[in-house]
Image: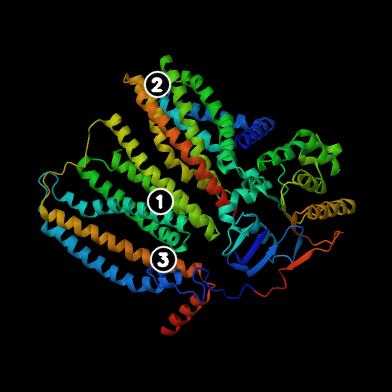
Amino acid sequence: MLAVSELACLKGDRLLFRGLSFSLEPGELLRVAGPNGVGKTSLLRLLAGLTQPEAGEVRWHGTPLARAREDFHRGLLYLGHAAALNDLLTPLENLRFACAAAGDEAEETACVRALERIGLAAQLDLPARVLSQGQRRRVGLARLFLSAARPLWILDEPFTALDVNAVADLAATLSAHCEAGGAVMLTTHQEAPFARAPRVLDLGGRAC
Amino acid sequence: MLTVFLAVLRRDLLLSWRGRADLLVTLAFFVIVVCLFPFGVGAETNQLRAIAPGVLWVAALLASLLSLHRLFAQDHADGTLEQLLLSSEPAVSWVAGKVVAYWLTTGLPLVVAAPGLALLFDVEQGALPVLTFSLALGTPILALLGAVGAALTLGVRGGGMLLALLILPLYVPVLIFGAGAVEAWLGGTGATAHLLLLGGGLAGALALAPWACAAALRIAME
Amino acid sequence: MTNERMTNPDNPPGRSPTSWLRFAAPQQFYPLAGRLAPWFACTAAVLTVVGLYIGFFVAPTDFQQGEVYRVIFIHVPAAWMSMFIYLVMAFWAAVGLVMNTRLSFIMSQALAPTGAMFCFVALWTGALWGKPTWGTYWVWDARLTSQLLLLFLYFGFIALTRAIEDPRRADRAGAIIALVGAVNVPIIYFSVQWWNTLHQGASVSLTKAPSMASTMLAGMLLMSIAAWMYSIAVALWRVRALILERERHTEWVGEVLEAEGRAR
């Protein structure tokens, strides 16, 4: 699905990694591991197409990203560090906008259901600024339930600030997505109860 | 493509409505700057009448610069911009949505308020429609060019000042034709040529600026 | 890991392009620029001396303006050069955006200060010329005004590329503003001309140079070529400095600096 060859990433003056090659197939759950500052977030941003690699290439179904941009972004769900919430809007408004901006058709009822499922039924009409960190994170994660049609999920630290139940629930959702033929790539410092142990890509172990 | 445009437009208008105190600041700035001029140059009616078109236009130009650096700042900080750039829809559509919303909330009030202020300068009443029309054509150009500058200076230290330095020289033609339209009408030569040129400028800016702005935003996110 | 030197991605080992395009790699261009720059600088110096000699001593005195007119031997080449450099800058910016070559961005940034300098020189000499001929240092003449706006465009470009810390972003952002500026330069020029004719009518005009003597023309031509040569030399030196700064972590820059240290 996604093939990476000889990737190098430069941040400012610092070479984060180079010669990185791997591929991601449908049904796979790939965890990018390594200590802080090793370039995990930079790698995910690069794979999502937000930044350009210093060297190397990323291919989506065999086509280089630069030429498959539209198709690639139609098949990608990327949730970054920031939750992409506007403080003046309610969780429901934020979620509906996020879906519409990404190019998805999102019915209001579907959005409400997604927010209820992730445990925000009581906060539907509150402005986002009064939510806790964990709740803000959940609003972003609610998009997972509306993005089953997008095969590739790239998630940066999705478990941060979530409680134990939410972690288990999220792990189950990710496992189910892989079962259904999707692929997930994520970073995390936490152990999560996945149905199948994820493949690990250790950036810290690579000499560079 | 249209859905994304409308979604962004609706959201930005809603956000402006929820923070509507900010909008009044732009308008108040415009009014105050215009009212400063008589104190500076004296209240002699003929002189005020002569400088009125220029004063109103310069003030409108500065007022539209006032909140420009905030156009993308909030979305940049909270990650929304990242998500927008990952949209499968063309970036031009949502950039256009944001700029239109920005113009409706900051440019349009200036267009509406300008004729009233012109009366303070004793501008001939017949010139008021020309003034309004020139502002209605000119301020969208300011917003479009400004959006490119705002995208380029996004997250840069001293961004607000830098934005002014980048954008103000580019505003000069708009100022010339905008203020010139009113003066030409007052001078009896008719404002058609000026207004046509402004319209042409608007068409050109509409065609080019959103692309440049989208490219600049992509660069800014790297 | 930070001290680890990296190979230059533009010029991966094992692949050595043989065409002239290889000079697009900073590593190849650095020594070439070092060899060429002194030649351009020498040519510039010689031409300036000859051009100024012709301009100040050989060319006949103008029957209308007297000796004052001789400032054009500096003023006109500087004004030409300032406009031309902006276009070259925009050209390199476009090449950089399309071909994704870092050297093109470096080139456009190396040219900007020279362009701004010429712009300033043109304004300064214009003011000095204006005082005796028009009786004032400044008139809102179309040419002077567009020259002033061009100076602001240069300032904007330089300020933007300096303010952004990440060199890659600085390159691309600068390229966009250079292109936006280049699109606007004709519009600004045209609009200022239009505004000027409305406000001043046909007042002073610089074009009324009746039958220019051939020695005047020769002096001006020599000075223009000298300005070209100077710009190229200075831009090459500045490119070298920028390359060293950008690539200071690569192996070859380490070697170059060591070699230069030994030579000293």
Q: Which residue is outermost to the top?
A: B125
Category of crowding for the residue at label 3, using alpha-carbon neighbours closer than 10 angstroms: few (below 14), some (14–19), many (at least 20): many
Q: Which residue lies under the disc numbered 3?
A: C239
Could you tell whether C215 is left or right of B43 in the image?
left
Kindly identify which chain the residue marked by label 2 belongs to: B
What chain does mark 1 sit on?
A: C
Look at the numbered disc 2 and give the secondary structure of its residue: helix
Q: Are marks 2 and 3 on the same chain?
A: no
Amino acid tagged 2:
Arg
Callout in the foreground (2, 3): 3
- B44 or A198, which is in the foreground? A198
Residue under circle 1?
C154
Question: Which numbered mark, 3 or 1, is in the foreground of this view?
Answer: 3
The number of callouts visible is 3
Q: Which residue is mark 2?
A: B49
In this rendering, is residue B112 above or below C146? Answer: above
Mark 3 belongs to which amino acid? Val
Q: Which residue is pictured at 40% across the width and 52% down the height?
A: C90
Q: Are marks 2 and 1 in contact (CB under 8 Å)?
A: no
Between the residue at mark 2 and the residue at mark 3, the CA separation in whole angstroms equals 53 Å
Q: Chain of mark 3?
A: C
Q: Is residue C24 toward the left or the right of residue A130 in the image?
A: left
Front in this rendered view, residue A144 or C83: A144
Q: Which quarter of the figure is the C terminus of chain A placed in? A: bottom right
Q: Could you tell me residue A167's position as x and y percent?
A: 86, 54
